[in-house]
Image (cartoon, helix red, strand yellow):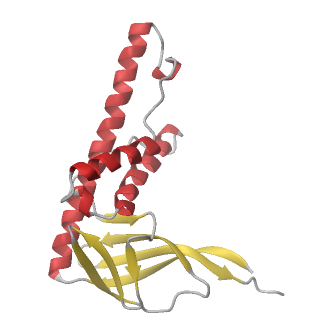
Amino acid sequence: MTKLAHTHVLRLQPRASHWARLREVCALSASLYNAALEERISHYRAGVRRAERLGLDRPSEIPGWRPIRLFDQNTSLTVIRRADPSGYGSLPVSLMRGVLRRLDVAHRRFLSGKGGFPRFRSAKRYRTLDFTEISGVRMTERAISFRAFGVMITIRTRRHRPFPNGFEPKTLRIVLRERRMELHVAGWADFEPAIR
């Protein structure tokens, strides 16, 4: 039996208070995304200025210089969470790492020539919350629960079909649409190829 990547989409049934809280979380996520992007840009510009002073073409030629990576920003996230316990510190760390991972993926796509440079995000247009790990999130048959701003948020789900056999969820994504909310559960499921 082999494992197959599988994404299961569930419809969430949020209350008005859930919409308000999740919009606050999206606003904080957008500000973290923008701050991390600004950190990468300013670090690179400082490297360019230093390379010009040394008579080099690009920052990568400077001995000991390296661009900011996801690991560096995840380390900075720990300091940010400690400094702001009622804001960033009250959200699940896997949610904040999801924001930084999203920026890292966009930046890597740009560096490989597959996409444009990552843009700054407004809080109104930031509508996706990624949980890179399931830790801190509780899923039952009828609801999903996680802690935000010191309060446990529990949102009912509408499951139209069961999960496949042997399904192991790995990541969660909450998507806020115009009039509905969805939960995308990605993971591995058992797959038995048809024998002919």
51, 77: nearer the viewer = 77
Q: Quadrant of the N terminus?
A: bottom right
165, 150: nearer the viewer = 150
**Residue shown at the point (48%, 92%) measured from the top left:** 161
Q: Is residue 121 visible?
A: no
Residue lying furthest front = 82
Q: Quadrant of the C terminus?
A: bottom right
Q: Is residue 32 visible?
A: yes
> Residue 73, how many percent across, how many down?
39, 44
Residue lying furthest right = 196
Q: Is 177 on the left or on the right of 167, as rendered?
A: left
Question: Which of the 4 image quadrants contains residue 99?
Answer: bottom left
> Residue 52, how many percent across, how many down?
40, 11
> Residue 146, how many percent across, how many down?
32, 74
**Residue shown at the point (20%, 77%) measured from the top left:** 18
> Residue 51, how many percent across, how many down?
43, 14
Does 32 sit above or below residue 148?
above
Q: Is 32 on the left or on the right of 184, as rendered?
A: left
Question: Which of the 4 image quadrants contains residue 192?
Answer: bottom right
Q: How many marks?
A: 0
